Amino acid sequence: MFKSEVKSEIGEDISILIKLDNHPWNYLCECGDASKLTVKDIQNSNAVFISHTHIDHFANFDSVFRHQIGIQRRVVICGPKGIAEQVRNRIKSYTWNLIKKGSIIYEIRELISEEKVIIYELEPPLWDLKKINETQGNVIFKDKSFEVSAVLLNHKIPTLAYKFKENDTTKIDIQASGFKGGKWVKELKETFDKQDTEAIISIEAKDYKSESLFHLLHIQKGDSVGVIMDHAANEENHSKIKNHFFECQKVFIESFYKAEDKESAITNYHSYSTMSAKVMREAKVVEAIPVHFSRKYKEDEILEIKREFDLELKNKS
Ligand SMILES: [Zn+2]
Ligand SMILES: [Zn+2]
């Protein structure tokens, strides 16, 4: 299960922290102002996901590397085409003569199209950008228990909308099986995952054909959480969102404007309350959360955005 939390207060920009049960690291989405984001949250982050580099999504990146210098490990930064150079430029605006090689390594992954990721490396003290690899497809981060894929949305520039998807797992109900647990459980799960129907599984000194035990197993669907930042509320973006985030467990979606300020949303390639809710409803997202509101709104207007969003989300027509 993922645990996700908005780390920005009302009136600040946007930053969301994602954690996974039984997993040691944090995953930071967006680097806008976020007073609830702690030094520990940053130091325990294993990867940072940036949708695009408008200042409200990237201004707090200085705090991120400020607190990560010295952690002596690799941190991945994911973002759109050009972010590798922007990260390097940000870092190089400081003086690094006392910082040694190995105090951190940034691995920067640019999704340059929905079919290709280019990977760079950046290290102190010189911070020269080195291209080290490229991969095919839109999976930009992968761990043994989950992966993150992205689609490119149009916000007058490409922005990345990320989906964290935990792996599906094979489960057994030991009590219902009538057997005692043992190493056969692991063997059975492995043969099931490989769909090896002929393997022999020994339980309590008796041999069984693997297929005859498959009914004891079931697949538990992995959790999923999405982060959809700035995007124009248009048909092309909506169709990508509905496709990529279909039946997602939880999605944070920008709802920058109130419905009555729809014209501003159109002008600025943003979305607005009712449209963000509509696309979440149509994507059959289980829990949809509106985030990232224009700073021109006061607290009561933000409550109104949330009300408009919730009403539209429940709209059955
Ligand atoms: Zn933007
Ligand atoms: Zn923004």
Image (cartoon, rainbow, N blue to C red):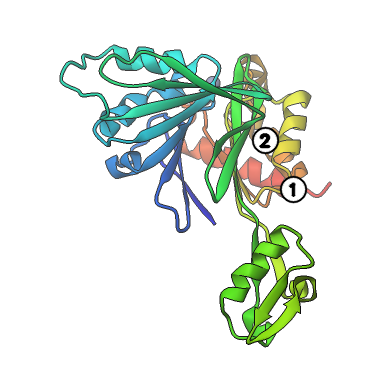
Label 1 sits on residue: 284
Comparing 2 with 121, the one in front is: 121
Q: Quadrant of residue 48?
A: top left
Q: Quadrant of residue 90?
A: top left
**Residue 183 visible, this angle:** yes
Q: Quadrant of residue 11?
A: top left
- Above or below, 80 against 165 in this view is above
- Above or below, 216 against 277 in this view is below
Q: Is residue 2 left or right of residue 36?
A: right
- Amino acid type at circle 2 is Ser
Tell me the element at label 2. Answer: helix
Q: Position of residue 232 (x, y in %)?
A: 67, 22
Residue sitting at 38 percent across and 15 percent down? 88
* Furthest-right residue in this view: 317
- Amino acid type at circle 1 is Lys
Label 2 sits on residue: 276
Q: Is residue 44 left or right of residue 265?
A: left
Q: Is residue 65 left or right of residue 113?
A: left
Comparing 231 with 247, the one in front is: 247
- Above or below, 58 against 128 in this view is below
Q: Is residue 239 left or right of residue 43?
A: right
Residue sitting at 72 percent across and 64 percent down? 192
Q: Position of residue 55 (x, y in %)?
A: 44, 19
Q: Position of residue 6 (x, y in %)?
A: 46, 43
**Residue 8 visible, this angle:** no
